[in-house]
Amino acid sequence: MRIGGSEILTCPFCGKEKRVMVIDSGNTFGGEWWSDNKRISPMLPYVSAVQKCPECGKYYYKGSVKSKLDREVKCSETGELTYPELKEAFAQLDEEGFGIGIMRQMKEGEVRMMLHHAYNDYFYRAGDGKVVPEEDKAMFHENALWLIKYIVSDKVMKAEFYREIGEMEEAKKILDSVVLNDKFLEKIARGIRERLEKNDCVVFRIE
């Protein structure tokens, strides 16, 4: 990975500046791919599309604020948010509105997918056995249904998202309707089926 400097973001609420990483090049060596379509690559980190201001604590969409590139000062900050932070961020951004037309759906979809991944990070990928509160289960369910309706187009991924929210019959119905000619997708589908038989909704790593 080669860091190409930093991007300086200006908070639209208080004017505080914040630096985040600029990546010139990277690779996916040593990376992980999970069943919720999250890729974790140490040599190609993801700079969060939603940033939290270190001064006022407000959240903003990275691509919608004043910014400037500084090639001289390198920075390793990605601004990745925790699940509790993303819940706050989504509530704030949803209240403010994501924009209009297709851009609104694209921005909202990106933030909702981040929320989906962060939930799995917090309750499952961390591996520390956290108990999921019913309120969070309900939010995760509603959010996944929105993603299935507007964002997730691949049938295998639709089945996986239904499995993650516990709608096992719908997940099985979708998988049964899919004709797979790709070995990698067959592998994912097999992993989903194995967990459907156990009524297991936990996200899993794809080997």
Image (cartoon, rainbow, N blue to C red):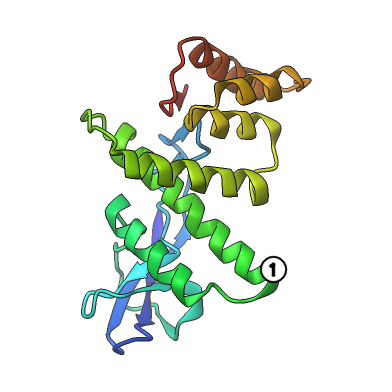
Q: Quadrant of residue 168?
A: top right
| Any part of residue 113 in sight | yes
| Residue situated in front as seen by the camera: 89 or 138 | 138
Total labels: the figure holds 1
Task: Say what amino acid the circle numbered 1 marks.
Answer: Ile
| Residue situated in front as seen by the camera: 197 or 70 | 197
| Any part of residue 44 in sight | no
Q: At which x and y percent is residue 126?
A: 27, 35
Secondary structure found at label 1: helix
Residue for point 64% across, 19% down? 172
Q: Residues within 10 Å of mark 1 (few under 14, many from 20)?
A: few
Q: At which x and y percent is residue 156?
A: 65, 29
Q: Is residue 101 above or below residue 160?
A: below
Q: Is residue 203 above or below residue 57?
A: above
Q: At which x and y percent is residue 163?
A: 53, 27
| Left or right: 17 as drawn, with respect to 196 | left
Q: Is residue 83 above or below residue 72?
A: above
| Left or right: 124 as drawn, with respect to 146 | left
Residue for point 29% across, 59% down? 85
Q: At which x and y percent is residue 82?
A: 29, 53
| Residue situated in front as seen by the camera: 109 or 207 | 109
Residue for point 45% across, 52% down? 114
What residue is disc 1 on?
102
